[in-house]
Amino acid sequence: MNPGISEIQAILGDLPSAPGANNTTPVSGQFAEWFTREVGEVNGKLVQAEQGLQQLAAGDTSSLHDVMIRIEEARLSFQLAIQFRTRVLEAYQDVMRMQV
């Protein structure tokens, strides 16, 4: 079962805001909104690609080219999201290793 956006928002909602930041708009809230929007866009592209494949398999579409473009866009979006996640985790680990 894939986690939904509401589960991701619940996790990100618990992040503290940056020290010294204006409390009316916490940094974590801005990041959470951006992250949620981007995850939604990646999910939308994956859904469109899957629908295109289903239409192609059923013979409902005449444009293989359009279906392949949607599949490639979804693949690239997903790879970018995975790379972003990896970089964020590496940055977090670097911060946690810092000696104070």
Image (cartoon, helix red, strand yellow):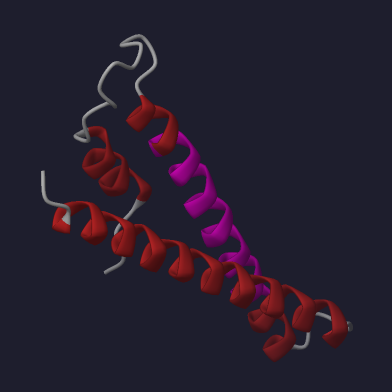
* Residue 45 falls left or right of residue 6: right
Q: How many marks?
A: 0
Rendered location of residue 100, percent (x, y): 10, 43
* Residue 28 falls left or right of residue 100: right
Principal SS element in the magenta part?
helix
Q: Residue at x 21, y 30 (%)?
A: 16
Above or below — where is 64 with respect to 41? below
The residue lying toward the viewer, choosing from 42 and 21, is 21
Residue 34 on the magenta span: yes
The quarter of the rendered structure image containing the N terminus is bottom left
Q: Residue at x 68, y 90 (%)?
A: 57
* Residue 37 falls left or right of residue 28: right
The residue lying toward the viewer, choosing from 50 and 83, is 83
Above or below — where is 73 with respect to 96? below
Rendered location of residue 20, percent (x, y): 29, 16
Above or below — where is 23 with respect to 43? above
Q: Residue furthest left?
A: 100
Above or below — where is 97 with respect to 1? above
Q: Residue at x 58, y 53 (%)?
A: 41
The residue lying toward the viewer, choosing from 95 and 36, is 95
The quadrant where residue 67 appears: bottom right
Q: Residue at x 55, y 60 (%)?
A: 42
* Residue 66 falls left or right of residue 33: right
The quadrant where residue 63 appears: bottom right
The residue lying toward the viewer, choosing from 9 and 53, is 9
The quadrant where residue 2 appears: bottom left
Residue 85 on the magenta span: no
User: What range of the chain is rendered magenta?
Assistant: 32-52
Rendered location of residue 32, percent (x, y): 39, 37
